[in-house]
Amino acid sequence: MTHTPANTQPYPFAKRVPAIPPIGAAQASSRSDTIPLSFGAPHSDTFPYDALNDAASEAILSQGRDALQYAGASGPSFLLDWIAARSARRAINVEPSQVLLTYGSQQAIDFAARTLLDPGDHAWVEAPTYFGAVSTFRTAEAVLTSFPIDADGLQTDEVEAALRAAVKTGKPIPKLLYVMPNFHNPGGVSLSLERRKKLAELAVEFNFFILEDDAYTELAFEEQALPSIYSFAPERVVYLSTFSKTIAPGIRLGWAIGSRDVISRMNTFFQGSKASVFSQEIVAQLLKKLPFEEHIAKLNGLYRANRDAMVSALKQYFGDDVRFEVPGGGFFVWLEFREDVDTSQFVQDAYERGVSFIHGKQFFVKPEGARFARLSFSYCDEERIHNGVKLLADAYYAYVDNK
Amino acid sequence: MTHTPANTQPYPFAKRVPAIPPIGAAQASSRSDTIPLSFGAPHSDTFPYDALNDAASEAILSQGRDALQYAGASGPSFLLDWIAARSARRAINVEPSQVLLTYGSQQAIDFAARTLLDPGDHAWVEAPTYFGAVSTFRTAEAVLTSFPIDADGLQTDEVEAALRAAVKTGKPIPKLLYVMPNFHNPGGVSLSLERRKKLAELAVEFNFFILEDDAYTELAFEEQALPSIYSFAPERVVYLSTFSKTIAPGIRLGWAIGSRDVISRMNTFFQGSKASVFSQEIVAQLLKKLPFEEHIAKLNGLYRANRDAMVSALKQYFGDDVRFEVPGGGFFVWLEFREDVDTSQFVQDAYERGVSFIHGKQFFVKPEGARFARLSFSYCDEERIHNGVKLLADAYYAYVDNK
């Protein structure tokens, strides 16, 4: 025999794959002539090219004998120290051993899901929420329930009511609650201090873990982000963040912070390996030399201007026909149109006119959210943002006029 | 509240973690004065430092605007083409879309396990086998059974007999069989051509997948490796390999090859992301310039000399008291002592004398293999290999004399 015989039987693949294909990548692709307001990616001007090049040379030529091996040189432990120290700004006080470096926070979500959830366990998420996390919870065979956000983030009174009702009626309590506290993707909003405390209390009272995904925390345009939920219940929160927005996403380094107990369990999935020690060495060498505060200030200057350009264009071209919260940081503006609008109905026309966005339904686990749309102001420059919003308005009013 | 209340309840973590902590990393660590014959790592002299440095500069300074983004520049697709072309040497004829780049082949094993195995499914492995794979199958909640190897690799007659007996008696058939065809870790042996064909036939007849882990395939000291098992049953094999042994392990890039069906399912676990596109760009730029055949020839010259040094020292210091197959490639010599020996009984004494190795029991899923030991000739130079084997003999004979 040299090739598959015709009588090959169908193979029973694991039930966990693939209930639903991942969202995002397809929508995020764009023709070169399209203004990609769908792109949730950093602006390429923010990458510290020269400093990265120096750091890579140091990692290869000076540290390479160890940095290119399995265990790495001193970069990985430098990074753990650096992250532990930096996390104090979120009121997180941890030892470096409580930090686990991962391939982007996407992998940390996967490790946390597999550590916290058995198949059939319940995970609660926000509505809207980040689709990458939803896909991961689905491959972990979790049962998903969602709770609405408003201008102050996740509506914790609804979460609390559902928990108390579940206990009364014998319904399942979640094992995990996934929440984005700062500059929510896609909502753009941040969780209030009171709600952070409330969520922490509920996690302890009802014995579930909070997965606190804080990817955008450094991108605060007006004032520093609030203390983390982690700071109010360190034994029941896994806190996640990433270098994807502050250095570069292609380097794929994120991290999880938690109790030693949960971090050592999550680390099981590395099977004795580590997230690329070579990439870690490069980032460590970079952070040794890069004036990080200046770098972040530069990023936030750029993104603030981009946000302002988007907000001003939205006001100019849409007037009162769209509602949104002005985000205090992050990458996204979350548009709410009137109730009978379905943004998926003009996403194709918009694309043909030259602008891409992500329609609302993609951010919900239930069939809802049709009147919403996510715009990103991170990847394009001010002029393209302005022109993109204008094209979006053209597509929107053509859609409304033809309804 | 500011910290965890005393009444925090125990949390019911997922059953899949951690049955058994990962092996390897702890044993692989060494004091600076110890000769680490336990290290299954490449020799640091084999890393192409200058070429890597040029490649990193190209990736950052010329390609960085895309290479540092989520989707990457052209490096990732170059690598898929390169791997597809190179795989023809293993009689693998595939499209680039049938190649999935992963964070080392360790991640490919994880993705394959999650794609092929539901909890409680059966996975068959070799005895001995690679402990990183075993840990991964355990976190996938697989039931493990092992089958012995000999000088021609996995004993496929035993596998076949077990399959036919299972069908007769209604016992479970495996969903996956994990095998290392070339320069086995730890066995050092290669699977014969007849057995490759037999395994492929069995996979089709009994409808299981073979996970063919071919990490050491390029490190062939005498003659080229045989055609892959994949080539005989492309619909029922996932083939794995890696740049860890040929370029550098710290870069963490491996790959899986399979049918479009299984590869697209495995890709689900990336959730729309990819293995670091920045690392991919560096490796792509490297491979565009590095004379790869010369590079591999240089590696194999070094490793062949190291192997010869180890074999000659083993003969000198152990005479007929140890048996082993002389490996035709790879990193390992697998020692078999007389039946009443337990190598775990002198691993500590050997370490105190200045040499580390991995004792046999760690490579088996059943409690067996005490009389074996794995030595690696890859990481140390010839002189240290010679001295390490001498110290090992000192520890061994002290153990035997005191039994």
Image (cartoon, coloured by chain):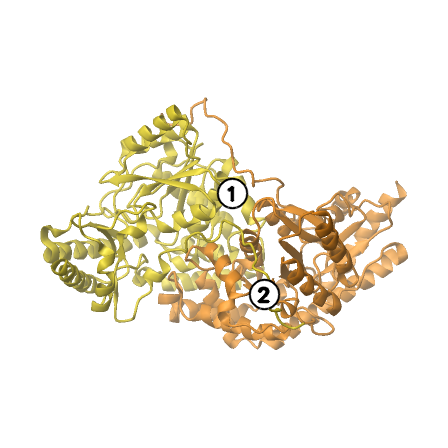
Chain colours: A yellow, B orange
The chain to which mark 1 is attached is A
**Percent from the top left, x then y, of residue B206?**
66, 58
Task: Give the SS element for disc 2.
Answer: loop
Q: Amino acid at mark 1?
A: Met
Of residues B99 and A403, the one drawn nearer to the viewer in this rendering:
A403
Nearest to the eye among marks 2 and 1: give it.
Answer: 2
B263 on left or right of A124: right
Q: Nearer the viewer, residue B304 or B106?
A: B106
Image mark for residue B290: none
- The residue that appears at 48% across and 26% down in the rendered structure is B9
Q: Quadrant of the C terminus of chain A?
A: bottom left
Whether residue A302 is visible: no
Q: Quadrant of the N terminus of chain A?
A: bottom right
x and y percentages locating residue B268 in the rendered image: 46, 56
- Can you see residue A144? yes
CB atoms of marks 2 and 1 within 8 Å: no
Q: Is residue B367 above or below residue B211?
A: above
Given residues B112 and B396, the one toward you in this image is B112
| Residue at mark 2: chain | B
**Is residue A190 left or right of A321 when viewed as pictured?**
right
Residue B235 got which mark? 2
Residue A301 drawn at (x, y percent): 23, 54
Residue A266's disc number:
1
Q: Position of residue A141 (x, y in %)?
A: 47, 44
Type of residue at label 2? Glu
